[in-house]
Image: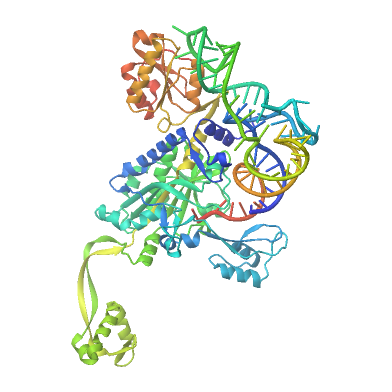
Amino acid sequence: MNTISKYDKVMDLATRRGFLWQSYEIYGGVAGFYDLGPLGVLLKNNIVELWREYFVKQHQEFVVEIETPIITPAHVLRASGHEEHFTDFAVSCTRCGRLYRADHLIKDVLGIEAEGLTLEELNTIIKEKNIRCPACGGELSEVRKFLLLFQTYIGPYSPENLAYLRPEAAQGMFVNFKRVYEVMRRKLPLGIAQIGRVARNEISPRQGPIRLREFTIMEIEFFYDDKNPQADILYHRCQDDKIRILTAEERRRGGDKPIEITPVEAYESKIILSPWLAYWMCIANRFVHALGVPLDRMYFEEKLPEELAHYSKQTFDQIVIVDKWGKLEVSGHAYRHTYDLERHMKFTKADLYAIRHLAEPVRVKKRVIKYDKKRILEIFGPQAREVFKVLSKYQGDELLKLIETSPGDNVVIEGIALPKDVFTVIEEEEVQTVEKFVPHVAEPSFGAERLLYVALEYAYTEEDGRIVLKLPPRIAPIKVAVFPLVEKEPIVQMARKVYEMLKEAGFYVIYDESGSIGRRYARADEIGVPFAITVDYDSITRNDVTIRDRDTRKQIRVPISDVVKVIERGIKGENILSLGYPIVGSNP
RNA sequence: GCGGCGGUCGUCUAGCCUGGUCUAGGACGCCGGCCUUCCAAGCCGGAGAUCCCGGGUUCAAAUCCCGGCCGCCGCACCA
């Protein structure tokens, strides 16, 4: 039995061969930060590109990608609720040093809900009720605030310049909703995608490259009309897909068995509340599968109501089973409904509504209030100017309400008494062909580095004591290796030519002539190169090469003129062994 | 944040308890040469170590002591 965990093996390989390693190593390293090496960058780029393919390019009529700053003024994250909710209140025991989340402690000891209380309120409760350390009875410290947002200042250090590094890309899409909606000619549904770095100042990240303080997020904020979701694509494309869902209900019962269901059924049976959330979960399932994770090794786990983020009505985490942690969340699918747009409207007064064209024009009876400016002038003389100013501050229906609720013949507005008869109410009928509404939002959100780890772990295999990284060819960092069978002319010269040809064709290629041929295959296998081309003695006379398939070690002979084509098809996922070329040298 | 354990070439490790003989040994990998007609073969040679960092004790520290960083495990935390 091997006692070394797969995680350790994967990380050892990843470090040794240049996929990733801890940042600032020569300074001792800093927890929560990882660097990507040459192969890591290629692999990540390929994963990002595959995501783009699945989520953006295949939906380019209605999903577009943008890029917004990482540094975010504090106002924005105040509006989004992060400044408030991204904070933990903690107390520690002055005797044994144990750390508690203040609200949880109060709830546990007193049985009262303390979530959402302010720092002062929490302090007061702890002092008044004389709450002590549950473990050792020691006295508790003052409540401290842990803000999980990284802070900075835009320009000079001063409170109004406070800013944070974004903890999610999403706010960039919400604040730009109106602009992109205009650019997309005011059509819904509309997906705004963004791939970028985010930062979260985790208190103590201790899960290697899994819990990072800075990472790459791939998100879509998908805006749609709740009354007319236009989600036909769910029925067209996801009718036959099966996804596995562990529902909140099942979890509440203590169960851990996901149900298997089509996204369509999940939506229609109200397991998933939003049709678009269901659709993107369908795509997410396919996407993670394409990274090499078998379908039966992943599922969606619904969050319990108390686990939901402040902005979410319903959330499913996409879980992949991994060696070390069992469950690893690789994506989150949140039904953010109207929360974010409404908050930004409230904080900025900006109009972030979408327009809905009504099937039939609606006649709306409206009572419009008018006032007699001449009479106001007569009554107030030079002061009339002030009166008009005050009146203009009030919306029509607010004024109407004031007048109707005031007793007597006068109405007093901000200290100014006006006789009611200066106002006249007119009934008007208006024909409306459109109405404003706040779009609902479904958000699929992926962590690129976690996907990278998952891809590595599922690709990692050992055969005959050597490592073979069976990455799907689509995401393999290096697509093809070229070897001269022996280091002799004219074989070497021909191999070099093949190498140049493949580079010219746009592939990442390695050329290796050192060591035995077996050693070179092994080296290429270890970094997941899916195809290895060998130029042998026969190649000279026949003008062909052998192409070896990494996973089966089987070879085919291919004329040089067809090599690029075969590799291209292989990268797309076709089995090159069945491409119709004669199999000649097969060495298991 | 707390407690326990740990940190030596790229990787794995010997040495640490019992300080000097360690200008730190080995294996694998890497580089060069020979050999080699397809799966980590063999032989020869070579490069490669801030002994995690800082301070202390000592004539002398990889080794003992203190602090820090990082990692693992447990507790706590995880929008």
Q: Residue at x 49, y 63 (%)?
A: A84
Query: Going by the picture, which residue comes out furthest to the left?
Result: A374
Q: Is residue A374 positioned above or below A80 on the image?
A: below
Image coordinates for residue A365, horizontal then vertical, percent: 23, 75
Image coordinates for residue A460, horizontal then vertical, percent: 52, 31
Image coordinates for residue A562, horizontal then vertical, percent: 32, 19
Q: Quadrant of residue A425?
A: bottom left
Q: Is residue A575 positioned above or below A317 on the image?
A: above
Nearer to us in this view, A253 or A136: A136
Nearer to us in this view, A375 or A497: A497
Q: Quadrant of residue A288?
A: top left
Image coordinates for residue A316, horizontal then vertical, percent: 47, 51
Q: Is residue A472 positioned above or below A365 on the image?
A: above
Number of labels in the image equals: 0
Visual colour scheme = rainbow
Instruction: Assign the N terminus of chain A to one quadrant of the image.
Output: top right
Residue A245 visible in the picture = no
Nearer to us in this view, A495 or A471: A495
Q: Is residue A579 positioned above or below A431 on the image?
A: above
Residue A490 visible in the picture = yes
